[in-house]
Image: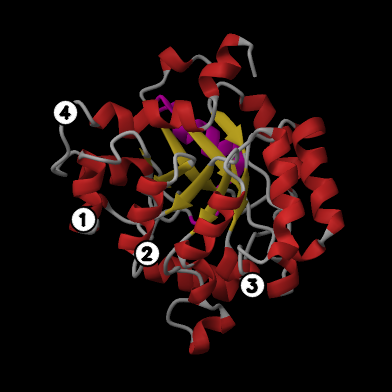
Amino acid sequence: MDLSALDAIDVHVHVEQDGHGCYALDQELLDASAAYFKADQDRTPTLERIAAHYRARRTAAVVFTVDAAAATGHPALSSEEIADAAAEHADILIPFGSVDPHAGKAAVARARRLVEQHGVRGFKFHPSLQGFDPNDTAFYPLYEAITEAGVPALFHTGQTGIGAGLPGGRGIKLRHSNPMLIDDVAADFPDLTVILAHPSVPWQDEAISIATHKANVYIDLSGWSPKYFPPQLVRAANGLLRRKVLFGSDYPVITPERWMADFAHLDIKDEVRPLILKENAVRALGLDEKASGRG
């Protein structure tokens, strides 16, 4: 990947459809998510369409699915297939893997294979959708494997559009995605790069505190239009956390062009903008080391 050819790096892009026509979520959850985000564009682009969309915008994309088969009963897309297909678009796509934490030792072994055999560059977790408390020590062997692999772990935090507006939220529990649970993980695994995904409403102050306190914790800004960012998050991004916040869109529910258009009007200092859009992600993802051949 030629970093000099990129204007930005989007660290939060969902693959919702595979090459076989299978979807990451069932239709009810897909429709609820689209309604929540008021998304009228293609909700399930293929990996090839994602690559073309981002290449045209000189923006790299971290792509992933979420394996929540145990909690939802819906078959997960294959992280192996996603990573292998992303390798054909290595100029623009950065594959993350997903394993179901409830799979125990099998999840640990699979995480290692995804890195060693399929070139996965990080892992995505969605505690609410996957139905687990991230600070439960039963899952610590999985974090140990990810730490040993030297790749980041990205955790959904805060409320979610998945299940929004449905009776009981389809059983999806928001408390699993309180960032304070991930503070335990960041403290117990200081060599693990942790990314807190999204403005963590209703726990925004907690997320800012964690990212300020823990050198290994970043915040991505996906899932919200910048015009709706909590004011304390904007202040932190301009100040203490200027090197700890990352551009993320949450494509396909929010397009990078919509996010960028609103970000252009956000009260962010000129010298901070390139940090958020690209430079912080280069460091958090270790892309500078990959480019130089050290990683």
Q: Quick one: label 3 or label 4, which is nearer the N terminus?
A: 3
Along the line of sight, which residue is nearer the eye, 200 or 114? Answer: 200
Three-letter residue code for mark 3:
Gly
- Name the residue carrying label 4: 270
Q: Which residue is painted at 47% across and 67% down in the image? A: 178
Q: Between label 1 and label 2, give the one nearer the viewer.
A: 1
- How crowded pointer 4 is (Cα within 10 Å; few <14, some 14-19, many 20+) is rated as few
Secondary structure found at label 4:
loop
Residue lying at the far top in this picture: please name it: 292
Q: Is residue 57 magenta?
A: yes
Secondary structure found at label 1:
helix
Three-letter residue code for mark 1:
Gln
- Marks 1/2: CA–CA distance: 23 Å
- Marks 2/3: CA–CA distance: 22 Å
Residue 86 drawn at (x, y percent): 65, 32
- Marks 3/1: CA–CA distance: 29 Å
Along the line of sight, which residue is nearer the eye, 87 or 247? Answer: 247
Q: Quick one: label 2 or label 3, which is nearer the N terminus?
A: 2
Q: Between label 2 and label 3, give the one nearer the viewer.
A: 3
Residue 19 visible to the viewer: no
Q: Which residue is painted at 26% across and 40% down in the image? A: 240
Q: Quadrant of residue 119?
A: top right
- Marks 3/4: CA–CA distance: 40 Å
Three-letter residue code for mark 4:
Asp
- Marks 4/1: CA–CA distance: 18 Å
Q: Residue 37 has which mark?
A: 2
Residue 30 visible to the viewer: yes
Q: What's drawn in magenta, residue-wise?
A: 43-59
Colour convention: secondary structure
Q: Quick one: label 4 or label 2, which is nearer the N terminus?
A: 2
